[in-house]
Image (cartoon, helix red, strand yellow):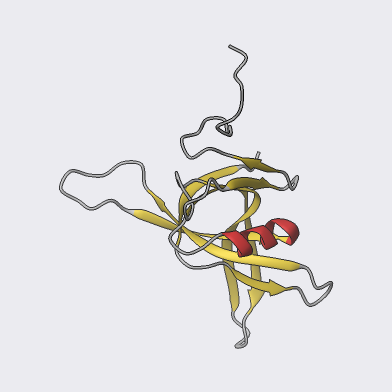
C-alpha cells in the first residue's frame, strides 16, 4: 500500500506547468512538515516535501493555495528519473496529491473549504462545526 497523509505549510506559491504531450496541467509546490518530536533545547525540525497535483486538483491548488498557508495533502509517493542537459541521470521522490484540504483555522477571513480528487467542495466552519445562518430554526 502506498498512501501518504501530510499537513504542513506551503514554502512557495504553487508553480503551474503543462505537459508537452497532451497539455495537461500540473501544479508543483513544497510543504514544510514539522517533525513530531523536538529535543529539549533544540529548535523544531521540518522536512520539505515536494508535491505534484495534476489536472483539476492541480488547478484548484494553484488557484487557492498560497505561500505560508497550512494545508493537508493525501496522496502517494512516487520516484522518477531523467537525464539532465549534461547527460547525468537525476532522481527525485515526490508526493502525487490525490486530495487537498485547507488546514488553517481561517483562510483570509472566510470559512474556506476542501477539495479532493472527486472534485467535491465542502463548506467548513472555522471552529470545525456546521455552518448555519443566524435565521435557521433548530429542531431541538
Is 129 placed left or right of 118 in the picture?
left
In the rendering, at what x and y percent does residue 136 appear?
61, 27
In the rendering, at what x and y percent does residue 66 appear?
51, 63
Residue situated in front as seen by the camera: 50 or 16: 16
Q: Is residue 73 visible?
A: no
Is 111 placed left or right of 57 in the picture?
left
Q: Is residue 23 visible?
A: yes
Task: Give the residue at x 73% y 68%.
Answer: 25
Task: Give the residue at x 62% y 82%.
Answer: 84
Residue situated in front as seen by the camera: 57 or 42: 57
In the rendering, at what x and y percent does residue 62 appear?
62, 64
Is 68 placed left or right of 23 in the picture?
left
Residue at the extreme bottom: 86
Residue situated in front as seen by the camera: 34 or 84: 34
Q: Is residue 45 above or below residue 134?
A: below
Q: Is residue 13 above or below residue 69?
A: below
Quadrant of the snapshot with the N terminus: top right
Quadrant of the snapshot with the C terminus: top right
Residue at the extreme right: 22
- How many circles with numbers are drawn on the protein? 0
Residue at the extreme front: 135
Residue situated in front as seen by the camera: 56 or 121: 121
Q: Is residue 123 above or below residue 8?
A: above
Task: Give the residue at x 75% y 61%.
Answer: 55
Residue at the extreme left: 41
Quarter-wise, where is residue 82 in the image?
A: bottom right
In the rendering, at what x and y percent does residue 130 appear?
57, 30
Amino acid at each position: 500500500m502506498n498512501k501518504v497523509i501530510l499537513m504542513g505549510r506551503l514554502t512557495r506559491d504553487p508553480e503551474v506547468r503543462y505537459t508537452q504531450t497532451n497539455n495537461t496541467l500540473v501544479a508543483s509546490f513544497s510543504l514544510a512538515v514539522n517533525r513530531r518530536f523536538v529535543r529539549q533545547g533544540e529548535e523544531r525540525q521540518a522536512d520539505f516535501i515536494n508535491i505534484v497535483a495534476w489536472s483539476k486538483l492541480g488547478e484548484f491548488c494553484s488557484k487557492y493555495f498560497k505561500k505560508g498557508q497550512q494545508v493537508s495533502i493525501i496522496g502517494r509517493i512516487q520516484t522518477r528519473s531523467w537525464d539532465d542537459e549534461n547527460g547525468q541521470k537525476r532522481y527525485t521522490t515526490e508526493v502525487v496529491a490525490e486530495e487537498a484540504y485547507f488546514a488553517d483555522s481561517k483562510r483570509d477571513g472566510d470559512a474556506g473549504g476542501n477539495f479532493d480528487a472527486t472534485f467535491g467542495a465542502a463548506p467548513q466552519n472555522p471552529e470545525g462545526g456546521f455552518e448555519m445562518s443566524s435565521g435557521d430554526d433548530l429542531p431541538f
